[in-house]
Image (spheres, rainbow, N blue to C red):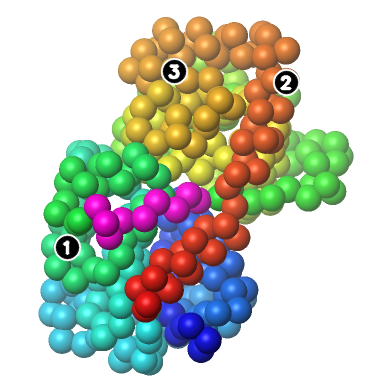
């Protein structure tokens, strides 16, 4: 197509923390740079005003629960009422508004359907309601891994030919000056971090398997991002990964697993689970454990901490592995999905 495709993109998830917010922010930034698209962004949050650098953001200070009712239940107004006429509308994972445009959405995981005990009942109810609308109306679904595609096919009636796998990228790219020893020293002093520590990632419910991680690291220094430390800026998060001896990520389930790429990009060895999407992301650059076995986690952890040759090999493989993942690549592949719908 010679004319630009006008794309509406829901970036409301930026108001929150976590992997979906990372996806939304990075993909939105990169889509804006593509010459064939005219982007318009929809943002709604009651408590957090939009303070990013995206152009053409239509911002509304209303609670997400109101938009959920408006878009998923009442459905008496389309997204065009808020952001104007569109060729494509790319919805978030929370609402599925009516639209005259071709409709695209992204599924990051199927936790509310496969493991509802890890989510709040209200969140499960919203996702179930929204899935029914997606099954009826959606033109294309993007999933972030082959594992998530398999899971989505199991829990939904979405046809396989409507699903496209597009991998995510790392949360950040550390510049050379960010790795200066003095900067790292000041960062560790600021948060009173031990000289040598194991990094784990916090989360809601049991999914991140933190109890087994704590048991496997008894007697060692374990730092849990978002639990023993507050949520950090992207720059400080990069310094945290770089300062760690190893990322211990024995999650019971992940739709993708961005922390694996974050560790690779900062030269941190990775120990992660041999289930769901994690081997798909880690490839040959990570050490895998049975997340249900404290003994397996402990044994692999001790091996990585004590074998310097193995550590250096993992760091080298991690740097190579992460080269295959980028938000620029994700944006180009997402734009290709948009174009196919309009052919």
At mark 3, the secondary structure is: strand
Q: Seen in the image, is 155 located left or right of residue 18?
A: left
Q: Seen in the image, is 116 located left or right of residue 186?
A: left
The residue located at (60%, 44%) in the rendering is: 324
Residue 265: image quadrant is top right
Residue 151: image quadrant is top left
Quadrant of the drawing holding the C terminus: bottom left
Crowd tier of the residue under label 1, counting other residues whose Cα lies within 10 Å: few below 14, some 14–19, many 20 or above:
some
Marks 1 and 2 sit apart, C-alpha to C-alpha, by 47 Å
Q: What residue would you read off at disc 1?
A: 135
The residue located at (43%, 10%) in the rendering is: 296
At mark 1, the secondary structure is: helix
The residue located at (58%, 9%) in the rendering is: 302
The mark tally for this picture is 3
Q: What residue would you read off at disc 3?
A: 289
Specify start and end residues of the magenta stretch as a single range: 160-168
Q: Seen in the image, is 37 located left or right of residue 176?
A: left
The residue located at (65%, 23%) in the rendering is: 314
Depicted 143 relative to depicted 45: above or below: above
Q: What residue would you read off at disc 2?
A: 312
Q: Nearer the viewer, mark 1 or mark 2?
A: 1
At mark 2, the secondary structure is: helix
Q: Nearer the viewer, residue 150 or 276?
A: 150
Q: Position of residue 193 (x, y in %)?
A: 67, 31
């Amino acid at each position: 197509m010679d004319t630009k495709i006008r794309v509406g993109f829901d970036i409301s998830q930026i108001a929150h923390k976590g992997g979906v917010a990372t996806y939304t922010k990075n993909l939105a930034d990169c889509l804006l740079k593509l010459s064939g698209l005219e982007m318009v962004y929809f943002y709604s949050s009651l408590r957090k005003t939009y303070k990013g650098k995206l152009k053409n953001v239509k911002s509304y200070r209303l609670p997400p629960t109101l938009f959920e009712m408006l878009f998923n239940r009442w459905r008496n107004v389309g997204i065009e009422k808020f952001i104007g006429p569109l060729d494509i509308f790319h919805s978030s994972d929370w609402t599925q508004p009516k639209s005259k445009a071709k409709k695209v959405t992204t599924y990051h995981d199927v936790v509310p359907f496969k493991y509802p005990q890890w989510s709040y009942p209200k969140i499960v109810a919203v996702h179930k309601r929204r899935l029914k609308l997606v099954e009826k109306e959606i033109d294309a679904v993007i999933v972030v891994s082959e594992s998530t595609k398999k899971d989505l096919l199991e829990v939904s009636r979405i046809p396989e030919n409507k699903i496209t796998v597009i991998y995510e990228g790392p949360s950040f790219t550390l510049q050379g000056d960010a790795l200066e020893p003095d900067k790292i020293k000041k960062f560790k002093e600021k948060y009173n971090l031990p000289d040598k520590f194991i990094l784990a990632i916090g989360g809601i419910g049991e999914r991140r398997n933190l109890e087994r991680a704590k048991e496997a690291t008894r007697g060692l220094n374990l730092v849990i991002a978002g639990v023993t430390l507050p949520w950090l800026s992207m720059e400080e998060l990069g310094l945290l990964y770089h300062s760690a001896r190893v990322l211990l990520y024995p999650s019971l389930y992940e739709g993708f697993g961005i922390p694996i790429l974050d560790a690779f990009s900062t030269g941190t060895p990775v120990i992660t689970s041999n289930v769901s999407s994690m081997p798909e992301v880690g490839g040959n650059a990570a050490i895998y454990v049975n997340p249900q076995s404290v003994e397996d986690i402990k044994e692999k952890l001790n091996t990585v901490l004590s074998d310097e040759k193995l550590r250096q090999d993992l760091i080298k493989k991690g740097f190579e592995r992460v080269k295959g993942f980028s938000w620029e690549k994700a944006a180009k592949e997402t734009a290709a999905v948009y174009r196919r719908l309009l052919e």
